[in-house]
Amino acid sequence: METINEGNTAETYKCWHEIFQRPVVQKTVSLLGLADALALSEPGLLNKINHDHLVKVWEAQWTPGRAPNLKCITFTMPFYAEGSLHSVLERCGELPLGQAFKIAAQLLKALHYLHVEQRILHRDIKPGNVFLDEGFRVAYLGDLGNAARMDELNEADANGGTRLYRPPELAGERYGIAGDIYSMGFTLLELFGGPLDYADLDNIEITRRLDRGLRAVADRYFRLGPTIPTSLERLVLAMVSRSVARRPSSAAAALRALGRISFIDWLPADSLGRREGFWPPTAPKVVLAVEERTIRSGPDAGLVELTVLHRKVQAQEWRRISQLSDRVRPDDRRARRAVYDAIVAFCANRWAVR
């Protein structure tokens, strides 16, 4: 038995299942105060929910040795080699953009299934409840123990969840589809932008902000890096908007918006700050590169020169794209993003995807 840290307060262990002859995960949670949680109200449903991007619950039982009033349940689920998205981001910092897009689409499909086909609200979406198989090929949304059935107003009680990812409107007593959209948006914020600096967060301040109807953390946390397309940042920021009306109306609407975004499959930068990417992401024909160099002398001293290069996938010779190269201030995130947005537009025009 091996303890797994997934960034939450549940007890999670990797175990060997003698009957299945494979590694599994056992997770023990307390559902005290969560009377409408599926694990208590409709436990059999957890075993019947079936989707390609939802974690399957194989077994569930009352946890031996725990006081009955604590309502502790231990779930047995598949073990995923890469662990949770939380642990992956803690290890890697960021994922290739193409992989992040695939993961986002898979999670939104799973959420659409829960909302539309099962009329279930997840109520605890976060990176620690997203799991990845080996090579980050497939993502799974998990931990439905706190999930609840929607009522006739498409709502449930605003119970449980992880405070950092809770929507600001939960100063009230009801939770709706917009709440899951917010938590999914916060999860995508970390998927595309890297993990938050958790050591910098103050749990008391998070509680105070939520009690005042604010987002759990300050506005400075809600931004993405310059390689992220402007259209993607707009989508993610809409999902985590303080205003329910400004969020996508459904997971399907968010998925459609995601599918309309053009992007280059940028890889994480190397130690010298050089970043390479592929166009188009699904069937690469061209390799792009952006090199950064701080100018040391002359009238532009202190600026960062961004040099944009390209080559065919099978070619060796790099060619400079002079009209896209630029010089920007080191702290000018908007100017850097303008360069990366321009690269996407250039590729879409010169090597159109048919």
Image: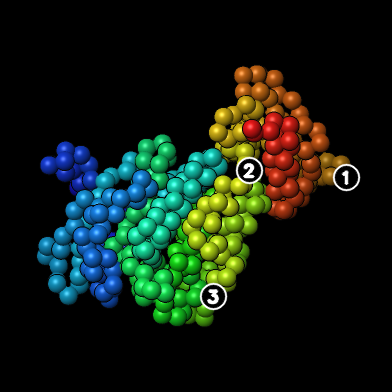
Residue for point 65% across, 19% down: 315
Which mark is on residue 214?
3
* Lateral position of residue 264 relative to residue 215, left or right: right
Residue for point 49% across, 48% down: 105
Q: Nearer the viewer, residue 305 or 165?
A: 165
> In terms of sequence position, does the residue under pointer 2 or pointer 3 come before the other?
3
Say which of marks 1 and 2 sits in front. 2
Residue 70 falls in image quadrant: bottom left
Mark 1: few/some/many CA within 10 Å (<14, 14-19, 20+): few
Residue for point 64% across, 32% down: 354
Q: Secondary structure at mark 2?
A: loop
Which amino acid type is marked by label 3?
Leu
Report the residue marked by disc 2: 262
Depicted 325 relative to depicted 158: above or below = above
Which amino acid type is marked by label 2?
Ser
Which amino acid type is marked by label 1?
Pro
Residue for point 41% across, 80% down: 173
Report the residue marked by disc 1: 299
Mark yes or no: residue 45 visible. Answer: yes
> In terms of sequence position, does the residue under pointer 1 or pointer 3 come before the other?
3
* Lateral position of residue 301 relative to residue 338, left or right: right
> In terms of sequence position, does the residue under pointer 1 or pointer 2 come before the other?
2
Q: Secondary structure at mark 1?
A: loop
